[in-house]
Each structure stands twice: as C-alpha cells, then as structure tokens.
Amino acid sequence: NLISPIALILNFLMWLPVSLAMYSGLGTLVFGPFTALGGKLLGVSCDECLRLLEQLIAWGREIPYAYLWHPAPPGWLIGVFYALLAIFVAFPALRPRRQWLAAIAAAWVAAALATSGIGSSMLAQVRPRPLACNFVAVGHGVSVLVELPDGKNLLYDAGRLGSPLAGVRPVSAVLWSRGITHLDAVVVSHADADHFNALPDLLERFDVGVIYVSPVMFERRQPAVEELRRSIERAGVPLREIHGSQRLILGGGVKIEVLHPPRRGVLGSDNANSIVLLIEYAGRRVLLTGDLESPGLDDVLAEEPLDCDVVLAPHHGSPRSHPSRFAEWSEPETVVISGSQTLGDLRAVESVKHSFRLAGAEVYHTAADGCLRVEIAPRGLSARSFRPHVRAVAADANANLRQPE
C-alpha cells in the first residue's frame, strides 16, 4: 500500500553508505579482538554510515509527495497482469512492440487507480449500499468503521493497548480493503490511549474531514493526549467538540445522535465521559459505547430504555459496566466485545457474555471471531465474522455450544 517515488533517489544515494556499513561492521567483528584502535575506527565508520542512512530517510520523509499510501488494486486486476506477463514470457512472438509497452503500462496503472482508492470511492457513492459497521479486531482497544449508504465514512475510535503500529495495521487494512482513502469524520470517544493511539499514523495515511471529541477530552494534559492534539494540528484537520443531545449530520438517511456525555461532562474517570453514539437506519439501531462506566453509565441507564439491534459492549466487556442492567436497558440482538485474546481477558468476559446471552443476544468477541461486519439494509440485518463463530444457547448458565455456523 506504499507508493514511494523518493525511493528511486534514496536507493541511489544509500548504496555506498550501506556497503560501507556492512564491511566496516564485519571488520569490527573480525579485527576488533586483535587491535583495539582498528576495531574502534571500523566501529565509528559503521556507526556514522548508519547515522547517514537515518538522516537520508528522515530527509526523504519530509519532502512533500515523496511517498503516499494507497489501497491495493483488486485481485482480479493483478491476476490479469501476471497472466499477460506469463503469456509474453512463454510465447515471445506475442510480445508487443517496445513502443507499446509504455502505453500498456500506463493503461494498467490507470486501471489500477480507477478500481481502487478514489475510483472505488466514487463508485460507492453512485451505487446503493447498506449501512455497514466494521468492528475491527485491534486487540485490547476499539475501532469501528461505519460506512454510510451514500458513500461517506465515519471512524469511531482507533487504538489499542501497547504499540500504536499494531493498531494502525488492522485499521488501515480494513479501510484499504473497502477502497477508502478519505474519512469524512473520526470520533474519539475519550482520552484513553487504547482508543486513539493509532490516529496520528492514520492521519498520515488517510485524509480526514473532521475529528470529534468530548468537551473534557483535553482537560487532563497527558503526554499521549498532547501528542494526539499536535498530530491533528500538523495534519490540519478541524477539531470539534460534541456532547449529549447533539446530532452528527453526515447524510445518507442515517441519524447519528450523541447520547453522552453532557456539555460539562460528569465527575469521574475518562471512561465515564466516553462519547456514546446512537446510529439509526432503516428502523435499526447501533449503539457505540467506548469505555462507558459509572457514573456516566448510570446517567445513560437513567434515560428511557432503547431497543438496540447492535451494541458495542462498554469497556471491552468489563464486568464493571453492569452488563445485566445494560442488557436489560438496551435489549440488544447482537453484542460485540472488542478485546484482546489474553487468557485473563477472555476469562473476565465469560460472565459478561452470559449476561448478554440471557437477554437473548448473539455475542461476538473480536479476539475469537476477528473483524465483524454488520450490514443494515431496508430488507434486514446481517452479521458476518471473519473467523468461524460458535453460537451459544442463552437459556441457562450451563448451556452447551452449538456447531459453528
């Protein structure tokens, strides 16, 4: 997914320091035990060559349009390319004349661009499509891609516990697999790194129209939160605050309402001030809850109950999110727990799964089921996981598992 024209220049500039670094490094190992001075000189030479390589890479990265990220061409187009290449190798007489090769290459590149990225986004806006929610498997974290019927896209959270790059990769992969290069809006639910630490790198790979945060997002000047603010400023993306009783206007006949937090937030942790989104389309409801906990959770549960079709379990399926009360209030048909596959996490959510199953919900866990795609169309709702999913009987605590669907 990386197109790097600057690499053509860098490769030419780097071959000499790379060669010197390899030979001087080898010389350090060979001669270092016998001559301290020779080993030191060779080691300094290797170190300076590596330093020069880093400087060249940093220089290339800062040049505008030196590289760009882009969705891969569709598989069938790549297959056509290799099929033609095999035919030309096997049957030299069929090879086109040299003056036609440039035209053929240009045509293939144009076709690749037209069927991915901007081209596929334009097609998505023309042809009808359902509302789709993709619950990305990022480990202990949350990222939900919402594809609206009119071609617009919203990303709810983007992060995971630990390395940001480990969260960037699956989110980028899902976006590119959908042919998405532009996000109309990003919602950061709250100021926990496992919900936003992938966003700075995503801002380098994708265009973003606007980023929404809660009114209390930047109240606590944490290093990770400050780095997020700086990355948003560098990218030049507008930053907007949203709070309960507001609506996000994205179009496509979809109603997106902010249920929480209130304008001034609530007392308690960042989790208690998570942005809760209610998405309604074709008579169906999807509820995204972030890490919602008390007292914010109590405020939400004090409102009129909602009959929801799909719910993101609060706080990665934590027992502190009062799953029984929440299930009774939201009456979900499908529940998604976004969490890691560590043994401790999986054991902790078993009781939570049982609470939702007793309420009649089908429960998915991204650690076990992978990315879950939920599609809502006027004709109904469908859910598809990317790994074999095991259905559980919700009748009692000792229910047996049915066969995989």
Image (cartoon, rainbow, N blue to C red):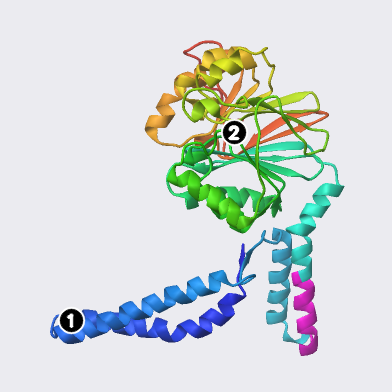
Residue 330 percent location from the top left of the image: 64, 17
Badge 1 crowding class, 10 Å Cα cut-off, few under 14, some 14 to 19, many 20 or more, is some
- Disc 2 marks which residue? 215
Q: Is residue 104 magenta?
A: yes
**Can residue 400 be seen by looking at this rendering?**
no
Q: Secondary structure at mark 2?
A: loop
**Residue found 54% across the figure and 74% down from its top:** 60
Foreground pick, 84 / 164? 164
- Total numbered labels: 2
Is 167 displayed left or right of 109 in the figure? left
Residue 67, can we see it? yes
Q: Is residue 341 magenta?
A: no
Q: CA distance from mark 1 to mark 2?
A: 60 Å
- Tell me which corner region of the image, top left, top right, bottom left or bottom right, holds residue 72: bottom right
In magenta, the rendered stretch is: 95-109
On screen, 306 above or below 346? above
